[in-house]
Amino acid sequence: MLKVQIILFDKSVLIQHGLSSVIEKIPVAHTIHFINSSDELLSFLNTSVPDLIISNTELIEKKHIKLIQEIIEKEKIKYISLQTDKTYNSDSIPTADTIELNSNENEILEIISMQIGSLEKEDKSKKKEIISTREENIVREIAMGLSNKEIADKLFISQHTVITHRKNITRKLGIKSVSGLTIYAILNNLIRMDEVE
Amino acid sequence: MVITKDIKMADVIHMNHFSLSILERFGIELGFGDKSVDETCKIYNVDTDFFLEIINAFIHTEYFPKKQLQNFPVKLITDYLQKTHNYYMQIKVPEIESLIEEMVLSCSTQKENINLLKRFFSEYKEELKNHIQREEKVVFPYTQLIENAFYSDKIDKQTLRQMDEYSIDIFEKEHDNIEEKLYDLKNIIIKYLPQPNNKTLCNKLLHELFGLEKDINDHSRIEDKVLVPKILEMEKGIRKKAGLKV
Ligand SMILES: [Fe+2]
Ligand SMILES: [Fe+2]
């Protein structure tokens, strides 16, 4: 995975630097962009796509909210809301989590790490999207040594469907044999090494 | 270009260096200077026509099926096939095994994954061994029996009984694509294995797998397209001679 791009949006220099010093403690390659105004945030989002936004939602101007919300949803950007006051939290921007001003360092670390962690997971799953989740399940069962009939019974589908899935799997992956599919399953974390045999 | 008996043997190698392994099987050694295919074959006591058919079939996959190969004695064909078997089991497979072993030893980041390849290949070796054993113990002796009977004046009961028990169409049906798994292994390395730190070794391994796959493919083609039809014909002839329904 490339460097995680993080936007820090708050007017207070103290908050920006405080947060960035906490983020530095997370052992993931990243770049932090400091942003001070709603205009600046929008123009940043118009030119590049960050992975994570930590922002004081209150500071986003009303006229920008809809646009920003659309970009965040479309690009699946993680949004952490920075709450300086308990009064305001826009419900239009899909918020992944909230950092409160009085949170301690561990709490903040945990919230940000979780979001970065989920980014990595999505990155991995993007890579192996060659076969569908259904097909993945079938590869898993094949690797476990189940026969077509056993797979059909277990997944409540007909044997015929299992055979069709197997054909598609072989065509997509270029792997036909059970032992070949087993290696594929292990390499792609569909199954653990110790689950085989 | 189809190879003929007057072409220089050296040019055959230049044309397709994979044919080195064919020469090795015929016991032909390098250093043939400017001698032609025919001259070289004579020195090594190799049937030139048979050599030409084999090498052409190997270089041009579309060269088959040619009736001519079927005129050669069964023994010539099965001897060649057997030599190829030896070449796989005694040279190629150990070579690949030691490459994989080397990869396991030199790899720091992917040991577990390379061990998966190792296990896959040792499974494959077992299958190949069984495949070959079946051919050498059952199929080849049977083909010799059929040829002998075909050329003898009268057909004895024992031959007919053996034909009842086993016939070449059984082989035709049970003869599996033994190179298929090599294709799997290649794809795993090319598409799915995270690159190990020793890329040179990995590429060497791939190269070997491509070579072996092609070779086995060609070998199976001779079994399926030459040996099987030849024996089928002879079986028919024998039945006819014995006054049975064909
Ligand atoms: Fe064979
Ligand atoms: Fe074979």
Image (tube, coloured by chain):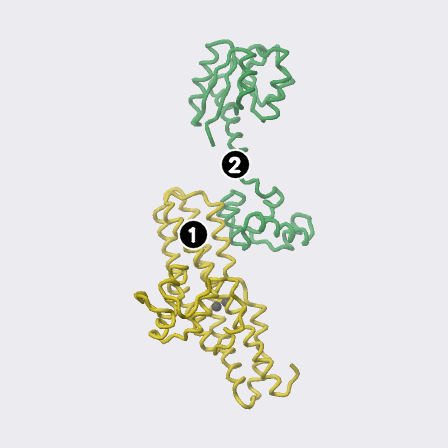
Q: Give the residue type that dot 2 points to.
A: Lys
Depth check: B64 or A145 in front? Answer: B64
Q: Position of residue B10 (x, y in %)?
A: 35, 63
- Mark 2: give few (<14), some (14-19) or many (20+) Cα within 10 Å: few
Q: Position of residue A40 (x, y in %)?
A: 53, 13
The chain under label 2 reads A
The residue carrying mark 1 is B206
Quadrant in which the C terminus of chain B is drawn: bottom right
- Mark 1: give few (<14), some (14-19) or many (20+) Cα within 10 Å: some
- Secondary element under disc 1, as helix, strand or loop, is helix
Depth check: A180 or A141 in front? Answer: A180
Residue A131's disc number: none
Chain seen in green? A
Please indicate whether residue A185 sits to the left or right of residue A135 in the image: left
Total number of numbered discs in the rendering: 2
Q: Where is residue B93 in the image (x, y as percent from the top left)?
A: 40, 60
Q: Please tell me if label 2 and label 1 are on a single chain.
A: no
Q: Which residue is drawn at 52% across and 58% down?
A: B180
Q: Give the residue type that dot 1 points to.
A: Leu
Where is B117 relative to A77, above or below?
Answer: below
The residue carrying mark 2 is A124
Chain seen in yellow? B
Mark 2–mark 1 distance (CA, rounded to whole Å) = 26 Å
The chain under label 1 reads B
**Residues at circles 2 and 1 in contact by the CB criterion of under 8 Å:** no
Q: Residue at x 59, y 53 (%)?
A: A146
Where is B118 relative to A82, above or below?
Answer: below
Furthest residue to the front?
B6
Depth check: B43 or A122 in front? Answer: B43
Q: Where is residue B116 in the image (x, y as percent from the top left)?
A: 45, 50
**Picture quadrant of residue A22:** top left
